[in-house]
Amino acid sequence: MENLIIGSTISKTFGKAGAESLALGEVNIDLAKGEFVAVMGPSGCGKSTLLYALSGMDTITSGSVVFDGIALEQLSENELADIRRQRMGFIFQQPTMLKNLSILDNIILPALRDARKDVAQLKEKAEALLKKTGIAELGNRDIAEVSGGQLQRAGICRSLMGTPDILFADEPTGALNSKASAEIMDLLVEINQEGTAILLVTHDAKVAAKAQRILFMKDGQIASDLRVAKETSESRMELINAQMTELEI
Ligand SMILES: Nc1ncnc2c1ncn2[C@@H]1O[C@H](COP(=O)(O)OP(=O)(O)OP(=O)(O)O)[C@@H](O)[C@H]1O
């Protein structure tokens, strides 16, 4: 399969010179177009840092990240912001949305920065996404008037406004109960089946089992790269649990 992202010897340190702590240590990772990859591992092992590095959300200390042939470290801040907005989508544990704005307005707000797009077109797209994610009737509600699961669906709508090649999801189900979590994962699987790659950080083996490939991180390294696309969901769970036991995570 064709690569979407090639990360080579990515290192990331935090802190002042002489007292740095290593969050990523020369990580090599390729993600294919359309692939669904989960990242697991203990707290502090570097999962979010890897997601931020591969999406150009944060700079790296050394190494390189090439997104569809474009070396991210060679881009200006504005060029990088354009790529993130137009070709990547982001979902977090709790979507940051503006109070006193409707769900619909929150969804179209970031896309308004693209001057080429007109508001009516954006609204039409947002409404189609609201329908797709099962919250068609909630567009006019204030963000305080919906459940956590519904708000996350709205966050997913917002992340899809640019028709991204990849969704970066950092603990998207972390704040949800198990029913809402399962529903959000079904939605992400559907979005992936329509061609969008997904890189998802999670602590939850059940969530990771929805992915085709699972990276297990430990101490800033990828300790294991498990491909489970052909496995049933039951055997995915077994493989994940066995790998976690083996790696003591
Ligand atoms: N902005 C920062 N400044 C200093 N250290 C940081 C910063 N962000 C992360 N770190 C450190 O880098 C390491 C990796 O952090 P990261 O957030 O990537 O871990 P994680 O695996 O996502 O953890 P969690 O599961 O708890 O979210 C940790 O030791 C963390 O303390």
Image: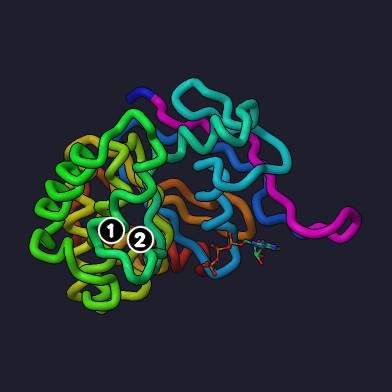
Residue 233 position within the rendered picture, expressed as x and y whole percent measured from the top left: 19, 58
Q: Is residue 12 above or below residue 136?
A: above
Q: Is residue 111 above or below residue 134?
A: above
Q: Nearer the viewer, mark 2 or mark 1?
A: 1
Q: Mark 2 touching mark 1, by CB under 8 A?
A: yes
Residue 98 position within the rendered picture, expressed as x and y whole percent measured from the top left: 38, 65
Asked where in the image residue 134 lies, by quadrant, the reply is bottom left
> As shown in the figure, which amino acid type bears the numbered disc 2?
Ile
Q: How is the image coloured?
A: rainbow
Mark 1 lies on residue: 209
* Residue 244 belongs to the span the image colors magenta: no
* Residue 12 belongs to the span the image colors magenta: yes
Magenta stretch: give its range: 3-20
Query: What residue is at 33 percent from the left and 37 percent from the top?
Result: 164
Q: Is residue 168 above or below residue 136?
A: above
Query: What residue is at 23 percent from the left and 77 percent from the top?
Result: 145
In the rendered structure, the answer to whether residue 57 lies left or right of residue 133 reads: right
Mark 2 lies on residue: 240
**Which type of secondary structure does the marked residue at label 1 adopt?**
loop
Query: What residue is at 17 percent from the left and 61 percent from the top?
Result: 139
The quarter of the picture showing ligand 1: bottom right
Assess disc 1: are there few (<14), some (14-19) or many (≥20) residues with their C-alpha within 10 Å of its C-alpha. Answer: many
Q: Nearer the viewer, residue 118 or 230?
A: 118
Please tell me whether the stretch drawn in magenta is mainly helix, strand or loop: strand
Residue 78 position within the rendered picture, expressed as x and y whole percent measured from the top left: 57, 34
Can residue 227 be seen at all in this image of the molecule? no
Residue 148 position within the rendered picture, expressed as x and y whole percent measured from the top left: 27, 74
> As shown in the figure, which amino acid type bears the numbered disc 1?
Ala
In the rendered structure, the answer to whether residue 16 lies left or right of residue 209 reads: right
- Image quadrant containing the N terminus: top left
